[in-house]
Image: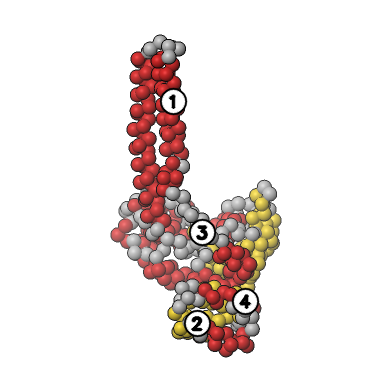
Amino acid sequence: MLKVENLRKEFDTVVAVDGISLEVQRGELFGLLGPNGAGKTTTIRTILNIIKPDGGSITFDGKPFVKEMWNNIGYLPEERGLYRKNKIINTILYFSSLKGVPSAAAKRQAWYWLERFGLKNDGYRKIEELSKGNQQKIQLIIALQHQPQLLILDEPFTGLDPVNQVLLKDVLLELRRTDAAIIFSTHQMEQVEKLCDHICLINKGKQVLGGALADIKQQYGSNTIRLEYDGNGEFLKSLPLVRTADVYQNYAELELVDIGRSSEFFAEVNDRLQVRKFEIVEPSLNSIFINVVGGTGKMTEAAEKPIPAAAGRNTRIINDVRVRKKMIFIILTSLLFVFYVAAQLTGITKWLWSVDAVLFGASAVSAVQFYRLRRHAEREMRSGGMEGGK
């Protein structure tokens, strides 16, 4: 269905996409992976001709990609592109009309998907009244409305809770059975591992890994140990038999130097931890991703760096541009008032009570405004902290 060969896109001195090639067949779930800034979104936008490629070829069913093919494609962008003041049903129907869906069919489809995603009773609410997760569902509905043959999803699981992630997974599998081709870009390796047939891993604009997921796992061997335990497993990273280690609180995935010495490794570990599970497994996609993109050296270096102390609360408030400007103004008017009064006391200038009053009043008003801005900045900081902790 979709074939991309040697795709290239440059921005000034940055090569965002450098020779990417991939092929996606009907009835296939394809994972486009990579770290932040790797070029995934640029690759997607270039494939869709939203931005012009500088090189390479893109064909759809063997034909060069043209605008007329857009109605066969559904696209979920990473950033939200909804009209916040509009009602949900009107928004869906508007985007459906852009894809050429007849009005009656669009309404029928819209209410079906709203019910499927648990939003049937919210159809006449405004977009801005929805949570981020529910706004993501609306964008998904818009991408699905016209029953696309090719569906491209950029970070589709963003904002969805576990229940809705399962719902989206079920929808993707259903679409796959209808012979649709699906590409999705995500950082959630477990979703890719469960859903995708083929993957393309890109880093710094270049394709570093690609092919059938099963073949890639086999390529990375079976030197991997999965360990579940009670105790402190940090020492696992420094054992001579361990090549790479992904260690959590009570779980670790380890690549051994020699799987033939696994009994020796188990004996050493069993002396220091209460082992609940020990098995030789294929490496997870998460560990392959870290190994290929991060590299053991980078991961170790990052782990050894101390976490910097957070800026003090007062420092962060003072660093607010509005608060800082008002504070500077108070200092300047106060200094001017003091200097002017001193000049009058020493006889350099005559007493002008009106000027004194204006300068004093300006300082006093600025002090009140500074206090209000400071309190407003404190509230913003607290709400930002609570939002970040959700």
Alpha carbon of mark 2 to alpha carbon of mark 4: how far? 19 Å
* Circle 4: residue type: Arg
Among numbered discs 3 and 2, the one appearing first in the sequence:
2
Judged from the image, the secondary structure of the residue bearing numbered disc 2 is loop
Count of numbered tags: 4
Q: Residues within 10 Å of mark 3 (few under 14, many from 20)?
A: few
| Residue under pointer 3 | 307
| Residue under pointer 4 | 243
Q: x, y (%) of residue 230? A: 44, 79
Alpha carbon of mark 1 to alpha carbon of mark 4: how far? 65 Å
- Circles 1 and 4, Cβ within 8 Å, touching? The answer is no
- Residue at coordinates 35% horizontally, 37% vertically from top-left? 371
Image vertical order of residue 298 relative to residue 254, above or below:
above
Give the label on residue 272, or none.
2
Among numbered discs 4 and 3, the one appearing first in the sequence:
4
| Residue under pointer 1 | 335
Residue with the most extreme left position:
121
Alpha carbon of mark 3 to alpha carbon of mark 1: how far? 41 Å
Q: Do we see residue 64 in this rendering? A: no
* Circle 1: residue type: Leu
